[in-house]
C-alpha cells in the first residue's frame, strides 16, 4: 500500500504579492485558493477538500473547551 | 460514492486505552495521554518502538504548538508520520479518518491516535480566563457576549420553534446518559437524576439548564490502528475495522450556518454510510457527540436514525437506550462519563469499540457488530462521522 | 497572557483590512452590507471577495436596520468576568431585511421578552472612541 502515483498536482498558484499590508490573511488565502483551480481548469465547485497552513493555534483557538 | 478506491475495511483498530477520567489532579495532559497510550499498546500486544505514526488533538491545559510532537518526546518515540489536528469537537473522528488514510496510503504502518487534556484540574487561571474570553470570533460574535454554548443553545431553541421539541425532551437525554454512566466504571457523574432535576438545575443559556450541559473533566484516550493485513498477521484479538468516514464543514460563524436545525452531520454521515455500504438502520450502537442534550436530538435526525423534527419524541420514546432503535453513548457520554475537551469525543470511540468487541459487561448491547461514531464542534461548524464494524461486517 | 483586569474588560473588535470599512460605517450610524456587483449576493460580514461567486466588485450599502429574531438565547451564566454585570442578557441571531443574518444582543427591553420572529431595529451603540457596536431593540 502506498500513495505512489495515486494523486497528482493539477493546478498551482503563487501569490505575486510580497508585502500585503492591505490584505487580511483570509483574503490572501482566498486569492491563492482561487488561482490554483483556475490553473487546473476547474472551478470552485469541483473542490471538496481544503487543507491549509494556518496561523498559530493559540491565536486562532476556539477555546471553549468544555462545551464543544 | 465519489471515489471507488476507499478506506473501507483496509484499516483496523487493534488496541484501545483510557486514562483515569473525571477529576484527576496532579496529572498533566501529557501523562494522561501517555497512560492511555501505553494501555492501548499493551492491549494491541505491541511495543512502543513499533509505532511509526502519531496523531493527536491539541490540549488546552498543555499549550504546546505541536502536541503530537511533544507527546512523542514524552512517550519516548520518534515517529516518521505525525500531526496535531484541530477541527474542534470533530477532531476525534478526523483522527481516525486521517490515521486510516495514512495507513492505507503507506505513510505509516502503525498509528497511535491519542488525545488528553486536564480541563478540570489542570488549567492555570490565565488559561481558564482565555478559554472564556477567546471562545468565538472577536469581531462579529464575542463583543456580544456569546460563548460557544450559546451557539448550540440557539440551534436547540430554533429546533423547539420549528418542531415543537420540549425542555422535557432535552432533559430526557441527560437522564438517559446518567443512567448509562451509572453502569460505567470510572464515570465522573453517577448519581441518578430525573427530568425534574434537569429542569430545576438553573438556566445557563436558554433553553439549556446546567444539567443540559456536558461536564468539564480530565482524561485521555488512545488507540492503535494498523492495516487489516497487519492486524491479521499480528493475530490481533477482535480487530475493529474502519468501514466508512465522512466530514462536512458548513460555516465558521454561527450566523452563516445555512440552517440552524439541519447540520453538516447529514452530509458527513451520508458519505460515511456510502463508503461503508451500510445505512443508519444497520447500526447496532452509536457514539454521538453530546456537548448538550439538544445536540443529541438534532444528531439522531441528521444521522438518519429518525426523520427531521422527530428527535425529541424519538428520545422520549426510549430509542437511544437499550431496547431502542439505537443505543447511544452507553458509557454516559460527555454529559455524564467525562468531557476533557477535544479528547472527549475519543471516549465515544472507546465505548463503541468495546461494544463491538463484546467487552462491555452489563452495558453490552447484545450482538453489536456495527457502530457509528459522530464528532462535532464549534456550534456545528465541524462534523465528522466514522462507521466501525467487526470482522463479520467486512 | 491575559491579566484578570483585561479579562474583566469587554472584548472589543480589532478591525482588520477586510473589516475596516464596516467598523467605520458603524461610527457614522450605518450598518454596511456588501453587495456583489457581479452576482447580486448580499453579504455580512465584510471581506475582500464575494462568498458566492468569488468576484471582487463589492459595494458597501447601508442596511435598513430592520430585521427579525431568527433565534436567540438568554445568557444567565456569563462567559467570563467581563459579562458578569450584564446577566441575564439576550443574544440575538438577527435576520436582516436584506437577507444576511448576524449576531447581536438586545437593548431597550427585558431579555425574557424576546420571541421568535420578533421585529427588531438597529441601535448603534458607542463602545469606545474607535468602536460602535450594532445592537438591536424591539421595533
Ligand atoms: Zn458575487
Image (tube, helix red, strand yellow):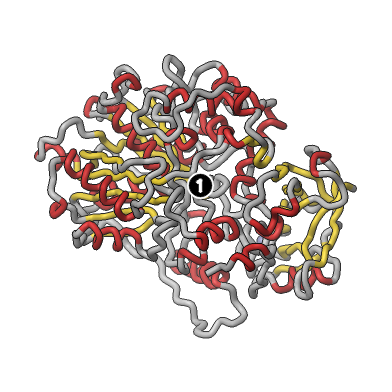
Q: Can you tell me which quadrant of the image ligand 1 is in?
A: bottom right
Q: Is residue C112 visible?
A: yes
Left or right of B235? Residue C77 is right
Give the answer, above or below, for where B4 lies relative to A27.
above
Relative to B316, residue B148 above or below: below
- Snapshot quadrant of residue C83: bottom right
Q: In screen coordinates, is B238 left or right of B146?
A: left
The one nearer the camera, B290 or C43, is: B290
Residue B389 in percent (x, y) is at 29, 30
Residue A4 sits in quarter: bottom left
Q: Residue at x 32, y 55 (%)?
A: B30
Q: Residues within 10 Å of mark 1 (few under 14, many from 20)?
A: many
Residue extending furthest right? Answer: C139
Q: Is residue B92 visible?
A: no
Q: Is residue B365 above or below residue C1?
A: above
Is B375 or A27 nearer to us in this picture? Answer: B375
The residue shown at (54%, 52%) is A64
- Using residue B239 as the reference point, say whether residue B350 is left or right of it: right
**Residue displayed at 43% across by 14% down:** B323
Point out the residue furthest to the front here. B26
Label 1, secondary structure: give it. Answer: loop
Residue shown at 55% from the left, 61% from the top:
B130
Of the pair C13 and C98, the residue shown nearer to us: C13
Residue A38 appears at what percent x and percent y?
49, 66
Q: State the image coordinates of residue C44 (x, y, percent, origin top left).
A: 71, 59
Q: How many numbered circles are shown?
A: 1
Give the labeled residue for mark 1: A66
Q: Nearer the viewer, residue B56 or B326?
A: B56
What's the chain of the residue with tag 1? A
Q: Position of residue A13 (x, y in %)?
A: 44, 73
Amino acid at each position: 500500500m502506498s500513495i505512489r502515483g495515486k494523486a497528482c498536482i493539477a493546478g498551482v498558484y503563487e501569490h505575486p504579492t510580497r508585502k500585503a499590508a492591505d490584505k487580511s490573511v483570509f483574503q490572501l488565502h482566498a486569492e491563492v485558493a482561487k488561482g490554483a483551480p483556475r490553473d487546473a481548469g476547474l472551478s470552485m465547485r469541483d473542490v471538496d477538500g481544503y487543507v491549509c497552513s494556518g496561523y498559530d493555534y493559540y491565536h486562532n483557538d476556539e477555546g471553549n473547551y468544555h462545551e464543544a | 460514492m465519489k471515489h471507488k478506491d476507499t478506506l473501507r475495511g483496509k484499516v483496523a483498530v487493534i488496541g484501545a486505552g483510557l486514562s483515569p477520567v473525571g477529576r484527576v489532579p496532579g496529572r498533566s495532559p501529557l501523562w494522561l495521554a501517555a497512560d492511555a497510550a501505553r494501555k492501548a499498546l499493551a492491549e494491541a500486544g505491541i511495543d512502543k518502538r513499533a509505532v511509526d505514526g502519531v496523531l493527536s488533538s491539541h490540549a488546552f491545559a498543555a499549550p504546546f504548538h505541536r502536541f503530537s510532537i511533544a507527546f512523542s518526546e514524552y512517550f519516548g518515540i520518534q515517529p516518521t508520520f505525525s500531526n496535531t489536528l484541530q477541527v474542534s469537537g470533530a477532531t476525534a473522528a478526523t483522527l481516525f479518518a486521517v490515521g486510516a488514510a495514512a495507513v492505507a496510503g503507506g505513510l505509516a504502518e502503525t498509528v497511535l491516535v491519542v488525545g488528553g487534556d486536564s480541563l478540570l484540574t489542570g488549567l492555570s487561571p490565565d488559561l481558564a480566563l482565555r478559554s472564556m474570553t477567546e471562545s468565538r470570533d472577536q469581531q462579529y460574535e464575542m463583543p456580544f457576549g456569546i460563548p460557544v454554548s450559546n451557539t448550540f443553545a440557539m440551534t436547540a431553541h430554533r429546533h423547539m420553534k420549528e418542531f415543537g421539541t420540549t425542555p422535557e425532551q432535552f432533559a430526557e437525554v441527560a437522564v438517559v446518559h446518567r443512567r448509562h454512566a451509572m453502569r460505567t466504571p470510572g464515570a465522573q457523574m453517577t448519581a441518578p437524576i430525573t427530568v425534574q432535576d434537569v429542569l430545576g438545575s438553573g438556566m445557563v443559556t436558554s433553553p439549556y439548564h446546567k444539567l443540559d450541559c456536558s461536564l468539564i473533566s480530565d482524561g485521555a484516550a488512545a488507540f492503535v490502528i494498523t492495516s487489516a493485513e497487519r492486524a491479521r498477521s499480528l493475530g490481533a484479538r477482535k480487530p475493529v475495522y474502519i468501514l466508512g468516514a465522512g466530514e462536512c464543514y458548513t460555516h465558521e460563524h454561527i450566523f452563516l450556518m445555512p440552517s440552524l436545525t439541519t447540520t453538516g452531520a447529514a452530509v458527513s454521515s451520508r458519505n460515511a454510510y456510502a463508503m461503508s455500504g451500510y445505512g443508519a438502520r444497520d447500526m447496532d450502537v452509536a457514539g454521538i457527540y453530546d456537548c448538550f442534550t439538544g445536540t443529541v436530538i438534532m444528531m439522531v435526525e441528521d444521522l438518519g436514525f429518525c426523520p427531521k423534527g422527530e428527535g425529541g419524541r424519538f428520545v422520549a420514546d426510549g430509542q437511544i437506550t437499550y431496547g431502542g432503535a439505537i443505543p447511544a453513548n452507553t458509557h454516559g457520554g460527555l454529559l455524564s462519563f467525562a468531557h476533557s475537551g477535544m479528547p472527549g469525543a475519543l471516549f465515544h470511540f472507546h465505548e463503541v469499540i468495546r461494544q463491538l468487541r463484546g467487552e462491555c459487561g452489563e452495558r453490552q448491547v447484545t450482538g453489536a457488530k456495527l457502530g457509528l461514531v459522530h464528532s462535532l464542534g464549534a456550534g456545528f461548524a465541524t462534523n465528522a462521522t466514522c462507521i466501525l464494524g467487526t470482522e463479520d461486517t467486512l | 497572557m491575559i491579566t484578570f483586569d483585561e479579562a474583566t474588560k469587554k472584548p472589543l473588535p480589532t478591525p482588520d483590512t477586510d473589516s475596516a470599512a464596516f467598523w467605520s460605517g458603524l461610527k457614522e450610524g450605518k450598518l454596511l452590507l456588501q453587495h456583489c456587483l457581479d452576482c447580486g449576493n448580499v453579504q455580512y460580514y465584510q471581506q475582500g471577495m464575494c462568498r458566492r461567486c468569488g468576484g471582487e466588485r463589492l459595494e458597501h450599502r447601508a442596511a435598513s436596520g430592520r430585521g427579525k429574531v431568527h433565534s436567540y438565547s438568554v445568557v444567565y451564566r456569563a462567559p467570563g468576568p467581563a459579562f458578569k454585570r450584564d446577566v441575564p442578557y439576550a443574544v440575538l441571531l438577527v435576520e436582516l431585511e436584506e437577507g444576511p443574518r448576524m449576531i447581536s444582543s438586545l437593548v431597550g427591553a427585558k431579555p425574557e421578552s424576546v420571541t421568535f420572529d420578533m421585529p427588531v431595529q438597529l441601535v448603534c451603540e458607542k463602545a469606545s472612541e474607535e468602536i460602535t457596536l450594532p445592537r438591536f431593540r424591539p421595533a
